[in-house]
Image: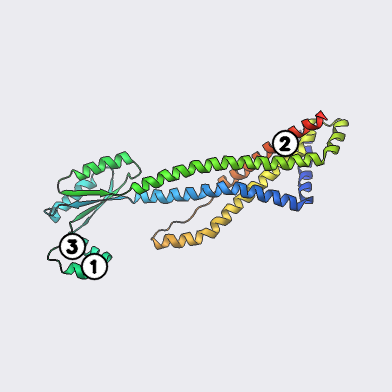
Amino acid sequence: MINYLLRHAQVLLATFGQMARAPLATLLTLTVIGITLALPSGLYVMLDNLERISAGWDRGAQASLFLKRNVTEAGAQKLAQQIRAMSAVGGVDYISRDAALAEFKKLSGFGTALNTLDSNPLPAVLVVRLSAADNPAAVESLMKTLAGLPGVDLAQLDIEWLRRLAALLQLAERAVVMLAALLSLAVLLIIGNTIRLAVVNRQTEIEIIQLVGGTPGFVRRPFLYSGLLQGLLGGLLAWLLVEASLLLLSGPARELAGLYGSGFALTGLGAEQGLALAMAGALLGWVGSRLAVGWQLRQIALR
C-alpha cells in the first residue's frame, strides 16, 4: 500500500515538473479553463444576489386601502385593528386625510395650487404590510377580503412587477444551467485536446514503455494527473476571478444600496461553493484526460 501511494506521489510530482517546464503553455491552458468556468459561476453569483434583493422587496410589499370619505378616524383605527389580526398581515399604518395631503404637497411640488382648494380631496389610507407576498394565492385571497371590508373604497396592490421579475430570474437560472453545461463540455474538449497532443508528443516513449512491460495504467497515470491538475487549478483560478470581480463591484453596489437606504452588500462564493467549483474543474479535467488518453492509446495500438 505504501509503495502504491509512493508511486502515485512520484507521478504527481513529475506532472508538476512537466507543467513547470512549460509555464507559458500551462498558463494559457489554465487561463482558458479559469475563464470558461468563471462565466457560469459569476452569473450564478449575480442571480443569487438578485434573488436576495427581490426577496427583500417581497417582504416589503404593501397594499393601500383607500377609505370612504364618511369613515371617521375612530372607525379607521378600529378597521386597522381588525386587519392587524389577520394572519397574512405584517402590520398596518394609518394615514389621515390631512397627513396624506401634506405628504402629497411635499412630493408633488403642487403645494401652491393645492392651497387654493376649498376642501381636502384625498381620502384616508390604511397601508397594509403583507407577510406572504411571495404566495400569489394568499395575496389574492387577502386582497379580496380587504376590498370587501366595510369602509374600504379601493384596495390597491402593485407587486405584479415582482412576479414578472421572479419569472425572469427563473428563466435566467435555466439559461445559466444550460450555459454551465455547454462550458463544461468546452472544458472537457480543451483538456482532452491538450492531453491528446501530449500523448502524441510522447508516442515513442509510450511505445518503449509498452515494449518493456509497462501496464496501461502506468502509461495513463501521468496524463490523468495532468488533466486533473489542470482542471483543479483552473477551478481555483475561476474562483479567484469571480471573487476579484465581486470585489470591484462591491463598492459601487454598496453606494447604490445606500442611496435607497439599504444595507445590501454583494455576496460571493463561500468556501464550500468555491471548493466545489475547484472539485468540479478537477473532475472535468480527469474525465477529459481519461477519454483522450484512452482514445489515443487505442490509435497507437492499431498502428
Cα–Cα span, label 2 and label 1: 74 Å
Q: Residue 251: x, y in percent?
A: 50, 62
Taking 169 as reference, is 213 above or below it? above
Callout 3, which amino acid? Asp
Q: CA distance from mark 1 to mark 3?
A: 15 Å
SS category of the residue bearing label 1: loop
Amino acid under disc 1: Phe
- 1 vs 3, front mark: 1
Q: Residues within 10 Å of mark 3 (few under 14, many from 20)?
A: some
Residue sitting at x 25%, y 44% = 143
Residue 13 in the image: x percent, y percent? Answer: 77, 45
Q: Looking at the image, can residue 86 be seen?
A: no
Residue situated in front as seen by the camera: 303 or 127: 303
Circle 1 crowding by C-alpha within 10 Å: few under 14, some 14–19, many from 20 = few
Residue identifier under label 2:
292
In the rendered image, the quadrant that contains the N terminus is top right
Q: Earlier in the sequence, mark 3 or mark 2?
A: 3
- Which residue corresponds to mark 1? 110
Q: Which mark is residue 97?
A: none
Q: Position of residue 153 (x, y in %)?
A: 17, 49
Q: Residue at x 40, y 63 (%)?
A: 259
Residue 218: x and y in percent read: 79, 34
Amino acid at circle 2: Ala
Q: Residue furthest front?
A: 303
Query: Is 263 situated above or below 15?
Result: below
Q: CA distance from mark 3 to mark 2?
A: 78 Å
Looking at the rendered structure, which numbered label has been put on residue 98? 3
